[in-house]
Image: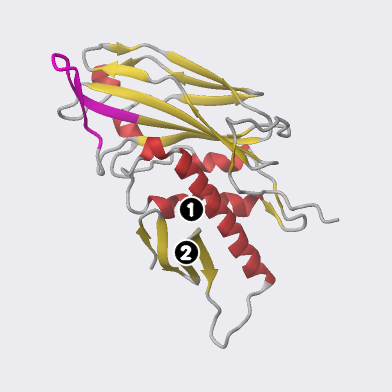
Amino acid sequence: MARLKGKFLIGTIGNLTFKTDKKGQILQRKIGKGHIKQTKATKTTARVFGKASSFSLCVRKNFGYVMGDHYDGEMVNRFNKENFAIFRQCYQPETERYEFKTDYFQRLNGFDFNVASPLKNSLWLVPSVQLSGRELLIRLPDCEIQTDFKFPTKSNICTLELMIYLISIRTGFEKQINLEPLQISNDQKIIPAREWKVEIPDGCICITGMLLYYYDYHSQQQVKIPINHKEFNPAAILDASVSDGEFNLPWDSSWQSSGLQFQPKIRE
């Protein structure tokens, strides 16, 4: 059985062995009895699993603020499993390319980073997300505090955080976008409807995440005491989509290299 040690898996899952070295996570497939060599199919499966796991790591690193260290012990395994299913469906063995489609990535919609505190248990009306052309529209409807929004014991204010992770399918460039947070107080009767609009480049995987961070606010001392902890951290993926077209933006400092490649190198 594999266990989470820090940010990495150590141990075995089936015939997969997880190790670490100075460069990070290593995945190896165990050879069967009699030192039977891997088939082409098993090598392909291992390669796709490795790509999916690397993608999962990129998302988790960029959503670090959303999760912090307040995720459940099985989250990494759960997230790798979902992305492996997506990548296996998208992989084209004839061309060694990944043909990503929004329909496949919708498997991630509603993924909670902490199963002990699902986002929907704290916010009854979860924001909707729609990608149309290059515009990503996030809508939060009117919410009544007493019926649609839950404040845990000792908390009196909450910050609703939204974050978008982008990765170019063609280049592997990645980018993190933090949207303007929404401050909510339990003195409010209604949370007014709100919209966020973001321009999304062509040819990108686009993942929108959300966090509710609660505080015990003491107005006289101007002190905010965080309430979220390891067993309570409502954070989830609202939407995972793929923008049409091909990424053609030049690199700038707002983009970083993910180290991932979804298309095979052209052989001369």
Mark 1 surroundings: few (<14), some (14-19) or many (≥20) residues within 10 A = many
Whether residue 222 is in magenta: the answer is yes
**Callout 1: helix, strand or loop?**
helix
Q: Residue at x 60, y 48 (%)?
A: 259
Residue 29, x across and y down, in percent? 54, 71
User: In terms of secondary structure, what is the magenta stretch mainly?
Assistant: strand
Image label count = 2
Q: Nearer the viewer, residue 175 or 189?
A: 175
Mark 2, residue position? 21
Magenta region: which residues? 212-228
In the displayed orientation, state which residue is furthest to the bottom: 34
Which labelled disc corresponds to residue 80?
1
Front of the two marks 2 and 1: 2
**Callout 2: helix, strand or loop?**
strand
Q: The C terminus lies in which quarter of the figure? A: bottom right
Q: Nearer the viewer, residue 178 or 143?
A: 178
Q: The N terminus lies in which quarter of the figure? A: bottom left
Mark 2 surroundings: few (<14), some (14-19) or many (≥20) residues within 10 A = few
